[in-house]
């Protein structure tokens, strides 16, 4: 149970860290979750429509539209029309939003990377397996 309690504590600490970022930048915590979802999709080579973003965040259509409008007004995202199908609009994160996020989360990411360098491949595989299993358990 000790590891379960440590995992819960880490989840709480990470949520607090994310909330501080949102507060310092005049954002709602859902805005931060949206930016993370958009960056994760981009990193995976996936385009994200408003519908797909709403599904990922558990928002209805009106809530998703309000969220994207808010992020666009703040300069964090932009709507991009598909060149082949002008009806299709994807949401992309602006580079300034990435830089803003990196300025807050970068030091934490650097510390995590440094910690991971202390583990050998076998240990990393165990950590990866545990975290992957936990992600599946939360869905």
Image: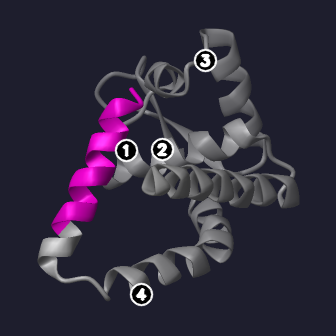
What's the CA distance linking mark 3 and mark 4?
36 Å
Label 3: which secondary element: loop
Depth check, front residue: 26 or 1: 1
Image coordinates for residue 89, horizontal then vertical, percent: 46, 27
Image coordinates for residue 101, horizontal then vertical, percent: 63, 65
What's the CA distance linking mark 3 and mark 2?
15 Å
Task: Tell me the magenta residue range.
Answer: 125-139
Q: Is residue 61 magenta?
A: no
Q: Is residue 120 above or below residue 41?
A: below
Q: Quadrant of the C terminus?
A: top left
Residues at circles 2 and 1 in contact by the CB criterion of under 8 Å: yes
**Camera sees residue 45:** no
Task: Indicate which disc, 3 or 4, sits on the residue closer to the N terminus.
Answer: 3
User: What residue appears at the point 52 percent right and 24 percent down from the top-left corner?
Assistant: 50
User: What residue appears at the point 50 percent right and 74 percent down from the top-left corner?
Assistant: 109
> Residue at label 1?
41
Image coordinates for residue 121, horizontal then vertical, percent: 14, 77
Which label number is shown at residue 59?
A: 3
The image's colour scheme reads one colour
Residue furthest left in the image: 122
Instruction: State which mark lies toward you, 3 or 2.
Output: 3
> Residue at label 2?
38
């Amino acid at each position: 149970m000790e590891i379960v309690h440590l995992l819960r504590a880490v989840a709480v600490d990470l949520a607090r860290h994310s909330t501080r970022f949102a507060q310092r930048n005049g954002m709602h915590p859902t805005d931060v979750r949206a930016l993370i979802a958009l960056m994760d999709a981009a990193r995976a080579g996936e385009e994200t429509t408003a519908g797909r973003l709403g599904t990922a965040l558990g928002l209805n259509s009106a809530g998703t539209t309000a969220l994207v409008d808010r992020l666009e007004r703040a300069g964090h995202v932009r709507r991009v029309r598909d060149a082949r199908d002008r009806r299709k609009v994807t949401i992309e994160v602006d580079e300034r939003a990435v830089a803003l996020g990196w300025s807050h989360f970068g030091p934490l990411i650097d510390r995590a990377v440094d910690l991971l360098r202390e583990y050998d491949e076998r240990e990393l595989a165990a950590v990866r397996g545990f975290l992957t299993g936990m992600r599946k358990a939360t869905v």
